[in-house]
Image: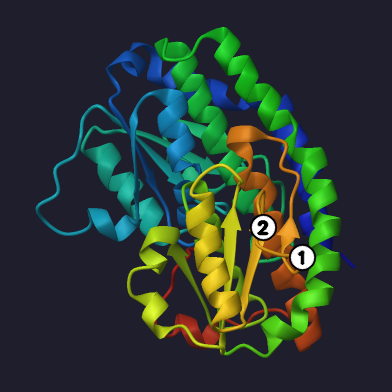
Amino acid sequence: MVTLLDCIERIPSIMEDILKKREERLAPLTEYLGEKVMKLDEVVFIGSGTSNTAALTSQLFVEKAAGLRVKVCYPNDFMGEGHIWNPNALHVFTSQTGTSKGTADIQRKLLTEGCICASITESEETPLAKESAAHIVMGCGKEEYGMRTIGYCASILTHMLMGMKLGLIRGHLTKEQYDVYLAQAGQVPDSRRVITKQAAQWFQINKRQIMRSACVIFTGSGSLYGVSLEAAIKFWEMPQVISAGYELEEGMHGPNYGYNSNHCVVIFNDGIRDVEKSLSLARFMKEVHHNGLVAGGTVADEKDLLLDLKSGDFNCLEVCAVPQIMAYYLTVDGGRDLTKPNNHSDMNRYFMTHQEKH
């Protein structure tokens, strides 16, 4: 039987395959764009759930690599009247299964409006892919669990490689700069293999602190804000623990007044960005409320998880292994069986978020 841990441990090999096949998989996009690529002034990522948090995680790097403004939207952001479509934006629709109803509806709408659109899904046979002007295979393969871990990482890496390709074609990146980024990305798989084992050991030491908390709050800045939001999703949908994700600065403007010893605040940092700010929050939670933890490139004390991050701008793909492992083991310790099929029949009587594949 394939466990969700098996899926997490499969991620490094999936990433290696995505890197190896990047040119082949991005070719439909570059061929579709043609000369229009030089007219682009924005990339708009559209998706829900993990597709949205993946885009928020990759957003800053795509801006940096492509030299274009990047916006992350929910499908509902395009519903109703009053929206002005940017004719020079590349609209990227991400849906792992390609069955997200809202995402498909908006792609259909924007294609009708003559917008530049592309999709990213798990295969060419998904409903979203079949309706797309250009489709990029995500490279995640068939993921056995609805609680996406492979798809989250595959989406991020695909977004980032797309940003690099756009930057190279448009002259924003030199070939040397492109190769430096590619080398950084190549460090992720082996680093994740190490971090996955470290995170499992660290969680066993600290799990009592997490399990006795009424809720878990994740926070980080830059790309680690996206990791924090995804961590909150995974904690709610897997072990069914009340959770929230905040951008680091936002989490220190308001929520901090509500924190108490029943709230476990988990802070992610990459050892580069906003380090002292993240450690100041950690010290507050540790010394005042006795319920703070840090995982990242710099830590506050011996209870934290110090990571030897290897991949530079791609370190979000290393750090996100930590909450994935935490959520998995918390689920196991909580006794929830993720192999049992989810019965959506009651929910579907009220609303449906995904269409059937056809």
Left or right: 72, with 145 as reference point: left
* Image color mode: rainbow
> Which residue sits at x=45%, y=19%?
167
Q: Residues within 10 Å of mark 2 (few under 14, many from 20)?
A: many
Q: Which residue is mark 2?
A: 299
Mark 2: amino acid: Val
The quadrant of the rendering that contains the N terminus is bottom right
Q: Secondary structure at mark 1?
A: loop
Residue at the outermost right position: 1
Looking at the image, residue 55 lies above or below residue 50: above
Q: Relative to 254, is 81 above or below?
A: above
Q: Which quarter of the rendering shows the C terminus?
A: bottom right
Where in the figure is residue 232, as x and y percent of width and height? 54, 70
Q: Is residue 147 visible?
A: no
What kind of residue is marked 1? Glu
Q: Quadrant of residue 38?
A: top left
92 to the left or right of 54: left
Q: Which mark is residue 342?
A: none
Question: Going 14% across and 43% down the picture, which residue do you hit?
Answer: 84
> Extreme front residue here?
287
The image shows residue 230 at horizontal and vertical percentages of 55, 62
Instruction: In the rendered structure, find residue 302 and report the number of the disc placed on it.
Output: 1
Residue 187 quadrant: top right
